[in-house]
């Protein structure tokens, strides 16, 4: 959709790492949004955009000079807080790749800043736009019985998925291991079905370097429904699915990878959903900050329960 004045939403993309190609492709499928500017520290990464968008090697220059309504922040996790804060302080709306930040204190500060400036802060949880997940959500909503249990599995070999973005393998830059990286997407799916949840327990397995590579996490909703999140960074293959058991014994499930044989193939349609929802929230002024912060709070709760944070 276009804005009331007839023009598309002008968006800058900050960071041209592994995930950026899915955003770029989504712009082509959404005529109501324009990729107006791009930014990356590497001049070579900017070359494909020289004739179609303004290009920058510093996000502060983009924020100062580019005529944008919003930015997509796709930089390494440890830079999320700084780049998001700079954009919000400039009055520019933000769509940031999960996690919102690597520290919960920074996530809370960003949320407060967004509300103080009355600027949209939106975290990109692409799995909530997966077609199989949306079908499952419709089935659960239409069912006669409530949810008894929900299980989200997020299993992969991180070395395969990191690609050239090797910072994923640095726990300090990533914010941790599988809990910090895959946890937010999984926690957001739990909240999509059950609403707010609290941590009941967590079993975390770390490698010789101290990075969490596997985790089995128990959550509970106020309704009494239980949730289990299984994370694995060392899995031989890839499994991304959601299983729901209703109180009448009915079992329903969604395989997020089904029908998408290409590696990361499901992301093509999921990021169209991300960008479209972000634009809708921009135009309607809907507060979007809670989802990103809630997922980050659960990451923090797991690490504190395990004793990794004091």
Image (tube, rainbow, N blue to C red):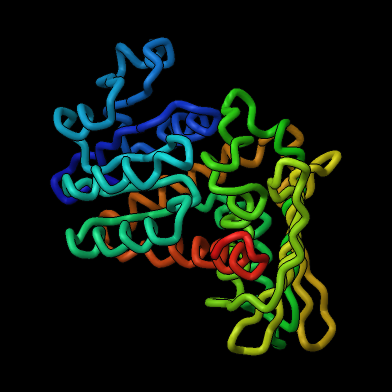
Instruction: Note whether 145 is above or below 155 in the view shown.
Output: below
Hey, which quadrant is residue 229 in on the image? Answer: bottom right
Query: In the picture shown, does residue 264 fall above or below 279?
Result: above
Front-lying residue, 218 or 6: 218
Front-most of 214 and 6? Answer: 214
Going by the image, does 246 lie left or right of 100?
right
Against 262, residue 136 (above or below) is below
- Residue 271 percent location from the top left of the image: 51, 42
Please give the name of the residue rendered at 65% of the width and 62% of the height, measured from the top-left corner: 135
Q: Is residue 48 above or below residue 282?
A: above
Q: Is residue 255 visible?
A: no
- Residue drawn at point x = 31 percent, y = 65 percent: 287
Number of numbered callouts drawn: 0
In the image: residue 95, left or right of residue 271: left
Task: Tell me which residue sits at (63%, 75%) in the image.
Answer: 199
Report the side of 237 relative to 254 (left or right): right
**Residue 95 visible here:** yes
Observer-nearest of 288 and 64 = 64
Residue 253 falls in image quadrant: bottom right
**Quarter holding the C terminus?**
bottom right
Residue 47 relative to residue 209: left or right:
left
The residue shown at (57%, 68%) is 301
Q: Residue furthest front?
A: 310
Q: Position of residue 79 (x, y in %)?
A: 40, 39
């Amino acid at each position: 959709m276009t804005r009331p004045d007839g023009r598309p939403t002008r968006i800058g993309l900050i960071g041209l790492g592994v995930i950026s190609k899915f955003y770029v492709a989504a712009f082509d499928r959404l005529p109501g949004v324009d990729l107006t500017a791009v930014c990356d520290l590497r001049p070579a990464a900017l070359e494909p955009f020289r004739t179609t968008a303004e290009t920058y090697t510093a996000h502060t220059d983009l924020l100062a000079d580019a005529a944008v309504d919003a930015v997509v922040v796709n930089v390494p996790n440890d830079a999320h807080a700084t780049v998001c804060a700079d954009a919000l302080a400039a009055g520019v709306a933000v769509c940031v790749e999960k996690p919102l930040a690597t520290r919960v204190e920074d996530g809370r500060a960003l949320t407060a800043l967004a509300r103080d400036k009355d600027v949209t802060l939106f975290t990109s949880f692409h799995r909530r736009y997966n077609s199989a997940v949306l079908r499952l959500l419709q089935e659960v909503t239409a069912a006669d019985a409530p949810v008894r249990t929900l299980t989200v599995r997020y299993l992969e070999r991180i070395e395969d998925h990191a690609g050239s973005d090797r910072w994923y393998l640095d726990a300090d830059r990533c914010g941790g291991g599988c809990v910090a990286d895959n946890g937010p997407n999984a926690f957001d799916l739990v909240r999509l079905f059950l609403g707010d949840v609290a941590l009941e327990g967590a079993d975390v397995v770390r490698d010789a370097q101290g990075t969490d590579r596997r985790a089995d996490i128990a959550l509970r909703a106020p309704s009494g429904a239980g949730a289990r999140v299984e994370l694995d960074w060392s899995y031989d293959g890839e499994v991304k699915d959601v299983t729901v058991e209703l109180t009448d014994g009915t079992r329903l499930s969604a395989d997020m990878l089904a029908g998408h044989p290409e590696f990361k193939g499901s992301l093509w349609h999921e990021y169209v959903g991300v960008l479209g929802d972000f634009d809708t929230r921009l135009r309607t002024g809907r507060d979007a900050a809670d989802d990103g912060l809630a997922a980050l709070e659960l990451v923090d709760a797991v690490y504190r329960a395990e004793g990794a944070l004091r």
